[in-house]
Image (tube, helix red, strand yellow):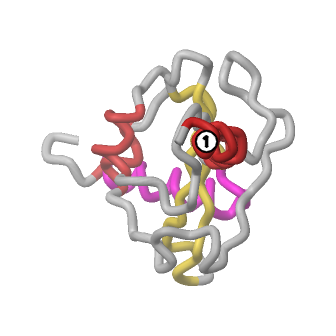
Amino acid sequence: MFDSMKRHAAPLTGLLAALMLGGCGNLSRIDDRGASASPVWPAMDETTMTLREGIHPDPARLALVKPGMTKDQLYHLLGRPHFLEGFFFVREWDYLFHLQTPSGDKACQYKVLFDRDMRAQQFLWREQACADAATALSAAAAGSKPGA
């Protein structure tokens, strides 16, 4: 019995380590402060996305996103990430938002990077048109509040 356990222990240990490492990781190189000079964007395909259709974010909630937030706080504002991010030590979340731009509804990738303490620090739009649309939506949401 012990010989059988010894024979299977090494391969099982290797498999377990591979599975655990597969659950780790980030696409981008993120420094301890939660920034990346060259972020890597996930492919928008069925193998990398958990919510293929994306969402139309609430502009008021999007406007509340700021540095220093925890993952739980972001989860309540934006929902779960829309791409496969891994399981452990994940320091970037990616979303697919649909925003209104001057040319119509646009699919926009949004990335949140976390520092070593898992606090959100950097917020990126893949395209400038999306950043501009998000700013306009947030300004419109702030202007539509009573008393604004």
Q: Number of callouts in the render?
A: 1
Residue interval drawn in magenta:
125-142
Residue 146 as seen in the image, left or right of residue 102: left
Tell me which amino acid carries mark 1: Met
| Mark 1 Cα shell of 10 Å, populated few (<14), some (14-19), many (≥20) | few
Q: Relative to residue 45, is residue 62 depicted above or below?
A: above
Q: In what element is the residue under mark 1?
A: helix
Majority secondary structure in the magenta region? helix
Please tell me which residue is depicted at 53% across the width and 58% down the height of the picture: 95
Q: Position of residue 141 (x, y in %)?
A: 32, 53
Please, which residue is most extreme toward the bottom here? 104
Q: Position of residue 121 (x, y in %)?
A: 58, 26
Q: Relative to residue 48, is residue 3 depicted above or below?
A: above
Please, which residue is most extreme toward the left here? 146
Q: Relative to residue 116, is residue 29 depicted above or below?
A: below
Near-viewer residue (133 or 34): 34
Please tell me which residue is depicted at 49% across the width and 72% down the height of the picture: 98
Instruction: Pick the quarter of the image with the C terminus.
Output: top left
Q: Position of residue 55 (x, y in %)?
A: 41, 70
Specify the quadrant of the image occupied by residue 92: top right
Near-viewer residue (121 or 141): 121
Residue 40 as seen in the image, left or right of residue 86: right
Please tell me which residue is depicted at 35% across the width and 53% down the height of the picture: 79
Residue pointed to by mark 1: 20
The stretch drawn in magenta includes residue 141: yes
Please tell me which residue is depicted at 54% across the width and 66% down the height of the picture: 96
Specify the quadrant of the image occupied by residue 115: top right
